Image: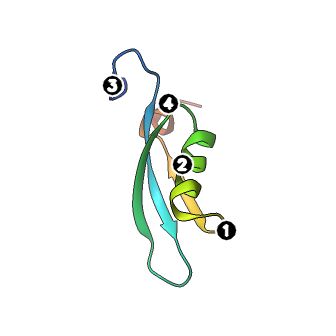
Amino acid sequence: MKQSRREGNREKLYVGVIWIGDKPGKRISVWAENPIAAKEQVEAEYGKGHVISLHNEEDAERPR
């Protein structure tokens, strides 16, 4: 099972797409401890008000 990029840290890789205005979606990735922190990082870099879709592959593959 993959851990994070930093030993002992619980960060996971979140990947997704951001749509800024009428431009095509741009692929993004961030390391964060949870989805809220991941979204906050993206908003800090690109600003608020954009459509953002993020997911963590490990979480997505878990049975529900």
Q: Give how far across and how far down residue 26 sits, in percent.
A: 41, 68
Mark 2 secondary-structure assignment: helix
The dot on residue 35 is none
* Camera-side residue of 1 and 49: 49
Question: In the shown orientation, is residue 60 left or right of residue 13?
Answer: right
The disc, 4 or 2, on the residue closer to the chain's N-terminal end is 2
Q: Name the residue under label 2.
A: 41
Tag 2: residue type? Answer: Gln
Q: Residue at x 59, y 40 (%)?
A: 37
Q: Distance between the residues labelled 3 and 1?
A: 32 Å
The dot on residue 2 is 3
Q: Mark 1 points at which residue?
A: 49
Mark 3 secondary-structure assignment: loop
Q: Mark 4 points at which residue?
A: 62
Please, which residue is most extreme toward the right here? 49
Q: Give how far across and how far down residue 36 sits, in percent.
A: 63, 42
Q: Residue at x 43, y 46 (%)?
A: 30
The disc, 2 or 1, on the residue closer to the chain's N-terminal end is 2
Q: How far apart are marks 2 and 1 (CA)?
A: 14 Å
Q: Closer to the observer: label 3 or label 1?
A: 1
* Camera-side residue of 40 and 64: 40
Q: How far apart are marks 4 and 3 (CA)?
A: 14 Å
Q: Closer to the observer: label 4 or label 1?
A: 1
Residue 46 higher or lower than 11, as above or below: below
Q: Quadrant of the N terminus?
A: top left
Mark 1 secondary-structure assignment: loop
Tag 4: residue type? Answer: Arg
Q: Closer to the observer: label 4 or label 3?
A: 3
Disc 4 to disc 3: CB gap under 8 Å: no
Hey, which quadrant is residue 3 in on the image? Answer: top left
Disc 4 to disc 1: CB gap under 8 Å: no
10 Å crowding of disc 3: few (<14), some (14-19), many (20+):
few
